[in-house]
Every structure is written in structure tokens, then in C-alpha cells.
Image (cartoon, grey):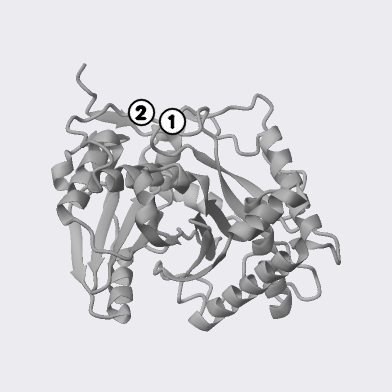
Amino acid sequence: MKANRSLRMPLLDVAFQLMDTVRSPQDFAFIFHFREQLNLDGLYAGAKSAMNRFPTTASCVRGHSWVWRENKYFKLKIVSAASEMERQAALERFIDQPFDLYRQPPVKQALILNATGATVATRFHHSAADGLSAALWLGHQLNVAYGLEAVETERAPFVIPCLRTQPEAVRRSEFAFAGASDRLSTANARGSGVRRWLTIVFPASDVQRACRQAGGFTYNDLLATCTLDVLSTWSSRRGDNGSQKPQIGLWMPMNIRREANAGFGNGTSRVRLYARFQPNASIVEKCRETRRQVSWTSKHGEWVVPDLPWFTRVPRSLIGPLLRCYLNLAFVDMGTCVFSHAGSWIANAGEAFKHVGEIECIGLLHPRQNLAVNAATHQGQTWLTFTYDPKLFSAQEVRQLAEMYQEQIALARNELS
């Protein structure tokens, strides 16, 4: 049976394309650092094979559809870097390049070579993929590059995620604040669209084990709780809300596929978590409160994607400005910060991930979310990346946030031991 050459864009794909602007690019990136050189032919063959397996990534937008353009349009950008400074500069230039989904596929990749190893940076536009889909794409590419999987020579059909539903879904968590979550105060009101990042790393195995022994919450809950605590402390110290307690909320992706790993594209919605902690509560108590919120919103369906068939048919020139205007209204709760954690996603994506030495996750930024905190746990360590706009935050301010987070993890480790 001949595979279809186009796919009508689902609601989430359209929404992320409409939200994409110069000041708010809607793409994210995985940066993998290898302590060895990579086979260029294998990496390129793996990318073309992944595009055959997941054809959206070799497609462009035409009207309201993804249209296959063949993987011959994929270009692997190769750069040599003599120093760490040159490598970082090359990564920043690569991240700064805009997407044009009408002319280019929604995946870009760069290979940066140095004397001791290689860095692979891969950008995915969120209109085509979520974090799980990106991990599946990269896992297949690396498995092909290392000879662990056969090359896909024929294009597979488009297979989008089948999403969960909830007949009596709520639109607002019972834990939500009276108003929207506070935005972190910054030096400027409007961002530039430029993204910079800072990554920290800390041991994870002992803390993961301690979370299981304590019971009632997960390691992901701990990382989210630490993020809420750090942002609450940061806002309080800066006096963002005067004498009032800051209203800090997280916008956290949630996989809503009916089958956990089935379907390529946007199978992720969100839950919102709030810093609703009692004064002087222990870290364990805070983590259990976070778990209580996650369990409630998972059960009651705050994550449900609305059924809006008309949305994908309205002209982009009309619906785009209206959607962006609505999301920027003061009463719309977009959370204070985006938080995500790739743990099992990466672990299950491919055997070749064992060759990855370090991971950085560059998040997307919305005008209402001027900071993204994205974690990845791999081989007993967690890499936590702060993505920020340098027009809004200084590098020194982000270093202070990172130091506060490391202190919070150290407190958690001591309390759980």
C-alpha cells in the first residue's frame, strides 16, 4: 500500500505553528555531547532513515497540511571548533536560526567537531514533535549510525498520536490561584526571541532511590518541587509582589497518548502545578503535595485537548493574532515557568543513547513564560538546563538561580538520606 504524501495538521500542530513568532520561537533542542568522534555517513544515514520512519520530519506546511518533501532536503550542518568558546558560539548561532516551515522541514541538525569528541545539536519545531517524539527520532538515528538498527529505505505512512479523553474534564485545577500565576520580573518587558542557556549536572541515582524509599512521590515530583521552591524564593527576595506571597506555577508537559509510545507528533498536553506549600513544610511534605496536585489533575482531565474542528480551518492570518492575543491576556494562566523532565523517554528511546556523555535541553519561551527549566536524567546523572532570553535575564542572574537549585537539591539529599 502506497503511503500517503500529506497529513492534515492536528489541532496542537496548528496551535504551535500559530504561536511561533520572532520573539517567541516555538522550537526546542536536544544537545548531545559525545566523548568520541562520530561516523558522519552513519549519522547522515540515520537522519534520512528517521525521516522515512517519521515522515512529518521531512515535510513542509502547505495550507493546513504537512506535505512530504523527501528526506533529500535534509542538511547536516558540520562545524569544527578549536575551543569550548568556539563550540558554544557555534551552538548559539545554530539555535538562533529561524524556522521557515513553508520551505524547510521541522528538524534541523548540526554536528560540531573538536579534538576530543563531537556535539550533536538537534532542533525540533513543536508544531511537528513533542519531547517523546524527538527522543524516538534521535534514538532511531543513533541506532542506525551505530549499526544497531537497519536503515528505513521506504517512507512509512503518517501516524499521529491517538490522544486520551476525559468526558468530564475540568478547565481549572482546584489548586489554582485566584488569578494567573505571576510572571518573573525582568529587566525588560519584551523579549528579543534570542535564547541562551546554562546547564548544571548533579548525581541522581541516590536521590531517585531515596524517593522510592520515602514513598508517596516520584523523582520527577522532587525536581518540580525544587523548581517551585527556587522560583518562589527568587520572587520573594526580589519583592516582585511587594508584601504578598508570589503566586508561582509551573507549566509541565504530560504525555496523553492512549498508548504511551504510539504515534509521532504532539501527543503531549500540560498540567499546571502550584507552590501551595505550608510554611516550614519539609521537602518530603512539599513533594507529596506536588504529587497530590499531579494525581488530581491527571484524574480530572485538566490536560484534555479541546475538540475544535473549526480551528484548523480558519485562515491563519485571522486566527493567529487572535490566539496570541488571548494567550497574552492577564487572566490566562500560562504558569510562571515551563518545567519538563526527560527520564524514561530517553532511556527507552534507543540503545545508542549509552554513547551520549552529556545532555542539554533547550526549551521554548512564551511571552508569559520568560524562563524554561528542562531536565534530562541519563546514566545516573541529571542535567538541568535553564533557558532564558538575555534581554530579560542576565547571565549572572541565571547563575544565581542555578546555584539556588543546587542548594535545594543538596537539602533534599540530606533530608532524604
Q: Nearer the viewer, residue 20 or 250?
A: 250
- The amino acid at mark 1 is Ala
- Look at the image and tell me in which quarter the C terminus lies: bottom right
Residue 123: tell me if it is visible. Answer: yes
Q: Is residue 201 left or right of residue 70?
A: right
The mark closer to the camera, 2 or 1, is 1
Can see residue 60? no
Tell me which residue sits at (19%, 49%) in the image. 42
Circle number at residue 159: 2
User: How far across and how far down the image is residue 22, in percent?
Assistant: 36, 62
Q: Is residue 211 left or right of residue 68?
A: right
Q: Are marks 2 and 1 in contact (CB under 8 Å)?
A: yes
Instruction: Identify the residue shown where x is 57% and y is 56%.
Output: 339
Place residue 187 in its image quadrant: bottom right
Judged from the image, the secondary structure of the residue bearing numbered disc 1 is loop
Are there few (<14), some (14-19), or many (20+) residues within 10 Å of tag 1? Answer: some
Tell me: residue 114, above or below residue 217: below
Q: Seen from this angle, which residue lies furthest top?
A: 1
On-image quarter of the N terminus: top left
Q: Is residue 205 above or below residue 388?
A: above
Residue 414: quadrant of the picture: bottom right
Q: Which residue is mark 1?
A: 262
Is residue 303 found left or right of 353 in the rendered image?
A: right
Relative to 171, say whether 372 is above or below.
below
